[in-house]
Amino acid sequence: MPQGQDDHVLRNRAYWDGRAAEYVDAGRRAWSAEPRWGMFGIPETEARILPDVDSLDVIELGCGTAYVSAWLARRGARVVGIDNSQSQLATARALQDEHELHFPLLLGNAEEVPYPDASFDLAISEYGAAIWCDPHLWIPEAARLLRPGGRLIFLGNGPLLVLTVPDLEADGPADAFLKRDYFGMHRFEWPDSDGVEFHLAHGDWIRLLRASGFEVENLVELRPAASATTRYEHVTTEWARRWPAEEVWVARRQVTDAVD
C-alpha cells in the first residue's frame, strides 16, 4: 500500500502488536476498576460520559484490551469489540478468562466492520478508532452500523494538545506555544513513532459528523483534578487544567438520512 493512503492500517497493526505488552498491566487494572477515562483516569462519576446501556447492542471500535467493553457488559450491554491488533486482543481474551466475562472480539479494522447495517444502538471508542483510524472512513462506517437514533461516543486528544506537543517526546511535554497549523489537520506521523494518528479541527469534526448522518449532542472537554496524575510524558496535569488535552464527542444517528 502506498504511504499516505491505506498504509496506516498495516502500520498501526504492527505498531500495536509491538507495544501490546506495555498495556497488559494497565488493561488488567482497568478491567478490575470502575470506569475512569483518558490519560488522567477521570472517574465516570465526574465525566458522566456513559448513557444507560442496559440491553443495548454496543460495539467498541478499536477496543485494545477491551476494558471499556467490559465496563459496558457489566452494565447489561450486549457488547462486541473490534481491534486491529492481534496481540492486544490476546490480552483482552486472557482478561475475559480471568474475569469470566466473555463477549465477541474481532480482529479487524474499524473502518470496515463485518456486521450488517443498523446492527448496534451504541458505538464507542476511547482512543482506539478515535485517533488510530481515518475519520473520513470510520465515522461513516459507525453511522452505517448504528440504528436510527443510535449514539456514537468517542474520546480523543483535543486539538490544542496536538498543536502544542513537541515533535519528539524527548523534547518534553506540550507547552504554551503553537507548533503546527490548525487548518488542514488530519494525518499525523510523529518522528519517534511508527504509528499513524488522525486528528481533526472542531469545524471539520462537525461537518464530517453531519455529512455522515449524525446530529452532534455534546462536546465534553475533560479537565483533570489538580491531584490527578498520568503516566504519559507528553502532557502534564498543569497543562491539562489550563487547556483541554482530551475531549469526548457525543452524536446521535439521525432518524432519517436527511441532512440539512
Image (spheres, grey):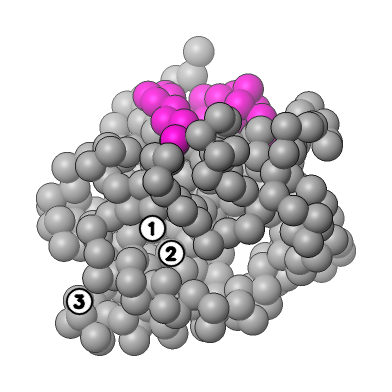
Badge 2 element: loop
Magenta-tinted stretch: 200-223
Which labelled disc corresponds to residue 63?
2
In magenta segment, residue 206: yes
* Pointers 2 and 1 in contact (C-beta within 8 Å): yes
* Pointers 3 and 1 in contact (C-beta within 8 Å): no
How many badges with numbers are in the image?
A: 3
Residue that numbered label 1 is attached to: 60
Residue 204, given in percent of the width and then of the height, sits at: 65, 27
Q: Looking at the image, is 93 positioned above or below residue 154?
A: below
Q: In which quarter of the image is residue 183?
A: top right
The three-letter code of the residue at mark 2 reads Cys
Q: Which of 20 and 241 is in front in this view?
A: 241
Can I make out residue 160 in this image? Answer: yes
The mark that comes first in sequence, 3 or 1, is: 1
Which labelled disc corresponds to residue 101?
3
Can I make out residue 37 in this image? Answer: no
Q: Please state if 259 lies on the left or on the right of 205 as rendered.
A: left
Q: CA separation, marks 2 and 1? A: 5 Å
Q: Which of 147 and 151 is in front in this view?
A: 151
**Residue occupying the point 39% across, 53% down:** 41
The three-letter code of the residue at mark 1 reads Glu
Q: Which of 213 and 135 is in front in this view?
A: 135
Which labelled disc corresponds to residue 138?
none
